[in-house]
Image (spheres, rainbow, N blue to C red):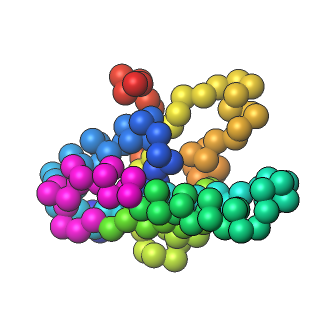
Amino acid sequence: MYEKILVPLDGSKLSECVIDQVRMMAKGCKIPKIVLLQVVEPMRPSATIYVGDEVAKDVQKKSVAAAHEYLSYAGGSLRTSCGGMETVVLEGNPSHEILEYAKSHGIDLIAMSTHGETGFVRWAVGSVTRNVMDAWAGPLLTIPPAGCRP
């Protein structure tokens, strides 16, 4: 079945809604590898101009470190449910980085939570899940946040 599942998380409780489903799949189907991924977006150039290059670099470095710490925490329940768990932090555009990682690392399934935004909010901020759905040719599991809202 699936050998490697990619689980993109953004640090929110809503993105974590998918973890329980992935844990059950990994345990029941004996999935050998789960990869938790978080993408840290770079500071916008306009903000970098305002705070300066050194501060921007420091903020980015701290954001990456916080993402590593978060993924370690978020993956706690998966460690005993699958053959192996890996955490990956990338920098860039979330949709692009998720898709590039999946394509270049032999991912069999991408499992993501949707945030349930609609209308103007979804249009204004976009949807990483939607972008991945539109571009990913392989299997994709999406979990709506119903019953998982904080």
Q: Is residue 30 above or below residue 13?
A: below
Q: Residue 42 vs residue 48: left or right? A: left
Number of numbered discs on residues: 0
Q: Is residue 12 above or below residue 84?
A: above
Along the viewing direction, whichever of 119 and 63 lies nearer the viewer = 63
Q: Residue 145's spot in the image, x, y percent?
A: 43, 29
Which quadrant holds the C terminus?
top left
**Residue lying furthest bottom in this view?**
104
Along the viewing direction, whichever of 48 and 2 lies nearer the viewer = 48
Which quadrant holds the N terminus?
bottom left
Q: Residue 142 vs residue 95: left or right? A: left
Q: Which image quadrant for residue 75?
A: bottom left
Q: Is residue 72 magenta?
A: yes
Q: Residue 89's spot in the image, x, y percent?
A: 48, 65
Residue 75 visible? The answer is yes
Q: Residue 88's spot in the image, x, y percent?
A: 43, 67
Q: Residue at x 62, y 65 (%)?
A: 58
Along the viewing direction, whichever of 97 and 140 lies nearer the viewer = 97
Q: Residue at x 47, y 40 (%)?
A: 12
Q: Which image quadrant for residue 29?
A: bottom left
Q: Residue 140 vs residue 93: left or right? A: left
Q: Residue at x 54, y 61 (%)?
A: 62
Q: Residue 41's spot in the image, x, y percent?
A: 64, 57
Q: Residue at x 42, y 62 (%)?
A: 68
- Read off the magenta span: 69-85
Q: Is residue 42 magenta?
A: no
Residue 138 visible? The answer is no
